[in-house]
C-alpha cells in the first residue's frame, strides 16, 4: 500500500514537472516572436494622434493588424517626427508608421513595405483667402512640418532658399501658426488637412486641392535598411488588403470604401 502511494506521488510529481516544462517552452521557446517596437509622430490625425493619453488612429489600428497577421506582438510609442527616422536608421525601433510617404530619397536610407495608402499634398488657408491654387502661394508665407513631402513640394515650386517657408516640428504647430496669422497657408497631406477642416469648423479654414501640381504619394511602413521583417510584413499587408480587414479599418476611419486597386499598380 505504502509502495503504491509512493509510486503515485512520484508519478504525479513527474507529470507536474513535464507539464510545467511544456508550459515554459511554449512561452520562451524559439516559436515565440519578439515584441516589435513601433514608433510614430502622434500629431497627424486621423492617422496618428493622442486621445486621452492614448495613441490612436488609422495607422495605429493598421500596424497592429499587420503585426498580428505576421504573428508579432507590438508596442507603439509616440516619439515625434524627426526621432522616427533616427530610431529606424539606428535600429532602436523595428517599424515606424506615421503617414510616411515612400520617396526615392528615403529609399536610399530605409526600406518600406508595399504601399498601404494613397495621399497628395493639399493647401490649408483661412476662408476668404486669395490663395486658390498652388501657384498663388508664390511670395506668401507658408508653414510646413519640417522634413515632410509638404516641405519638398513647396521647395520644388519656389526653391530651397525660401525665407517665406516656415518649418515646424509637427503639423499641429504649423496649423497653430496659420490660426495666429503668422503664415498665409499650410501645406500637408490631403486627408489630414480635410479632417482638420471638418473637425474644427470654428477655425474658419478651408482646403485647396491642386491635382495638377501635387503628385500622388503612397504611404508605407518604414523599416531599417535590410530589415528581415520586410518579407513577413509585406505578406501581411497584402493579406489584409485581400481579406477585407483593410477595408473594414478604412471604412471605420474614413467612412468611405478604399480604392485597393490603386495601391497594387
Ligand atoms: N506624408 C508626409 C511625408 O511622409 C507627411 C507625413 C507626416 N506624418 C506625421 N505623422 N507627422 O513626408
Image: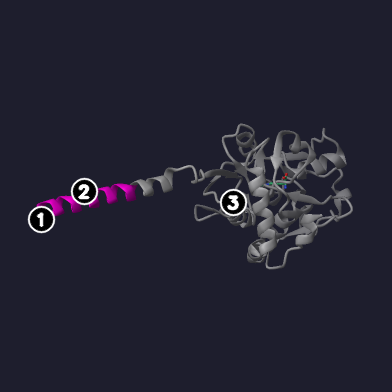
As helix, strand or loop, the secondary structure at mark 1 comes to: loop
52 up-or-down from 77: above or below: below
Examine the residues drawn in magenta and state their main secondary structure. Answer: helix
- Label 3 neighbour load within 10 Å: few <14, some 14-19, many 20+: some
Q: Nearer the viewer, mark 3 or mark 1?
A: 1
Magenta span includes 6:
yes
As helix, strand or loop, the secondary structure at mark 2 comes to: helix
Q: Is mark 2 within 8 Å of ligand 1?
A: no
The residue wearing badge 3 is 70
3 or 2: tag closer to the N-terminus:
2
The residue wearing badge 1 is 1
Q: Nearer the viewer, mark 3 or mark 2?
A: 2
67 up-or-down from 244: above or below: above
Quick check: 117 left or right of 211?
left
Q: At 67% from the left edge and 57% from the top edge, which residue is drawn?
A: 239
- The location of residue 158, given as percent across then percent down, is 86, 40
Q: Which residues are magenta?
A: 1-20
The disc placed on residue 10 is: 2
As helix, strand or loop, the secondary structure at mark 3 comes to: helix
Q: CA distance from mark 2 to mark 1?
A: 14 Å
- Label 1 neighbour load within 10 Å: few <14, some 14-19, many 20+: few
Magenta span includes 263:
no
Q: CA distance from mark 3 to mark 2?
A: 42 Å
- The location of residue 157, given as percent across then percent down, is 87, 42
Q: CA distance from mark 3 to mark 1?
A: 55 Å
73 up-or-down from 94: above or below: below
Q: Nearer the viewer, mark 2 or mark 1?
A: 1
3 or 1: tag closer to the N-terminus:
1
Q: In front: 213, or 87? A: 87
- The location of residue 129, given as percent across then percent down, is 81, 56
Quadrant in which residue 262 is drawn:
bottom right
Amino acid at each position: 500500500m505504502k509502495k503504491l502511494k509512493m509510486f503515485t506521488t512520484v508519478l504525479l510529481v513527474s507529470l507536474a514537472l513535464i507539464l510545467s516544462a511544456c508550459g515554459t517552452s511554449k512561452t520562451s521557446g524559439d516559436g515565440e516572436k519578439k515584441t516589435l517596437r513601433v514608433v510614430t509622430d502622434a500629431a497627424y490625425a486621423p492617422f496618428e494622434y493622442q486621445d486621452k493619453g492614448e495613441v490612436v488612429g488609422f495607422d495605429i489600428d493598421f500596424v497592429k493588424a499587420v503585426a498580428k497577421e505576421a504573428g508579432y506582438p507590438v508596442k507603439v510609442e509616440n516619439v515625434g517626427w524627426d526621432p522616427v527616422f533616427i530610431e529606424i536608421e539606428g535600429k532602436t525601433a523595428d517599424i515606424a508608421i506615421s503617414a510616411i510617404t515612400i520617396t526615392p530619397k528615403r529609399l536610399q536610407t530605409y526600406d518600406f513595405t508595399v504601399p498601404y495608402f494613397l495621399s497628395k499634398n493639399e493647401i490649408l488657408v483661412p476662408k476668404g483667402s486669395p490663395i486658390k491654387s498652388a501657384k498663388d502661394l508664390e511670395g506668401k508665407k507658408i508653414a510646413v512640418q519640417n522634413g515632410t513631402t509638404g516641405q519638398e513640394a513647396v521647395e520644388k515650386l519656389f526653391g530651397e532658399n525660401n525665407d517665406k517657408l516656415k518649418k515646424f516640428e509637427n503639423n499641429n504647430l504649423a496649423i497653430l501658426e496659420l490660426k495666429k496669422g503668422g503664415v498665409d497657408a499650410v501645406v500637408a497631406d490631403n486627408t489630414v488637412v480635410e479632417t482638420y477642416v471638418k473637425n474644427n469648423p470654428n477655425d474658419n479654414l478651408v482646403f485647396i486641392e491642386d491635382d495638377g501640381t501635387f503628385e500622388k504619394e503612397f504611404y508605407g511602413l518604414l523599416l531599417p535598411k535590410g530589415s528581415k521583417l520586410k518579407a513577413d510584413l509585406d505578406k501581411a499587408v497584402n493579406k489584409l488588403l485581400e481579406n477585407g480587414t483593410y477595408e473594414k479599418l478604412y471604412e471605420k476611419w474614413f467612412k468611405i470604401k478604399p480604392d485597393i486597386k490603386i495601391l497594387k499598380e
